[in-house]
Amino acid sequence: MEIKTIKVGFLQTNCYILTLNDKCLIIDPGDEADKIIKNIDKDVIGILITHYHFDHIGALNSLKDKYKCSIYDIYNCKSNMEVGPFKFETIITKGHKDDCITYYFKDNQMMFVGDFIFKGSIGRCDLEGGNYDEMLKSIELIKKYDDDIKVYPGHGDETTLLYEKQNNPYF
């Protein structure tokens, strides 16, 4: 699987394009639909939303209208999903917001976490829908996963679960 990261909007949200064979998924199209579209050369079969903050969904309607694809989020995902050639698990990771979900591509050892985890930190819990106690529960849940998993956050650099377990004060 190929991953392309596009930083969009004034908050520099990481929008990810996952490509496998001739299909692709978009994760968190935060803004700048035209910029995202220019980076797509495969058939878009779905858009995954980690949570519904403006900086993660700003281009959602434009892309949905263009590609006529399904939207996947906390409200319609099962724990194990198969979208075209993509297979992934979903993990409810509330805390930053009450609609946060992590997408775990087990075969590729990758997690797309939105604003749940940042390299060396976590997402804010003081915004509407945030809850620090829920965040701590989500962290305990995610700590059980394999250290080698790459973590792709909503902002900033990618990391690994091992790095977070060793360096993140919230872990």
Image (cartoon, grey):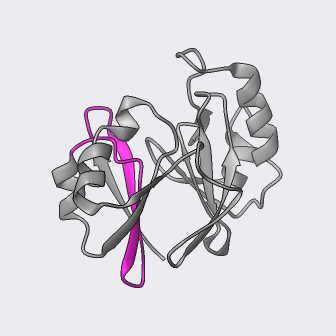
Magenta residues span 8-32
Q: Is 103 included in the stretch rendered in magenta?
A: no
Task: Say above or below: 103 vs 168.
Answer: below
User: Residue 23 at x, y = what percent?
Assistant: 39, 77
Q: Residue at x 60, y 32 (%)?
A: 122
Task: Say above or below: 142 vs 133.
Answer: below
Q: Is residue 51 left or right of residue 134?
A: left
Foreground residue, 18 or 71? 71
User: Residue 167 at x, y = what percent?
Assistant: 69, 41
User: Residue 19 at x, y = what percent?
Assistant: 41, 74
Placement of the C terminus among the 4 image quadrants: top right
Foreground residue, 27 or 117? 27
Foreground residue, 20 or 121? 20
How many marks the image carries: the answer is 0
Q: Is residue 153 left or right of residue 92?
A: left
Q: Is residue 6 left or right of residue 134?
A: left
Work out which residue is located at the far bottom of the displayed protein and give it.
21
Q: Residue at x 78, y 56 (%)?
A: 145
Q: Residue at x 23, y 47 (%)?
A: 62
Foreground residue, 1 or 22? 22
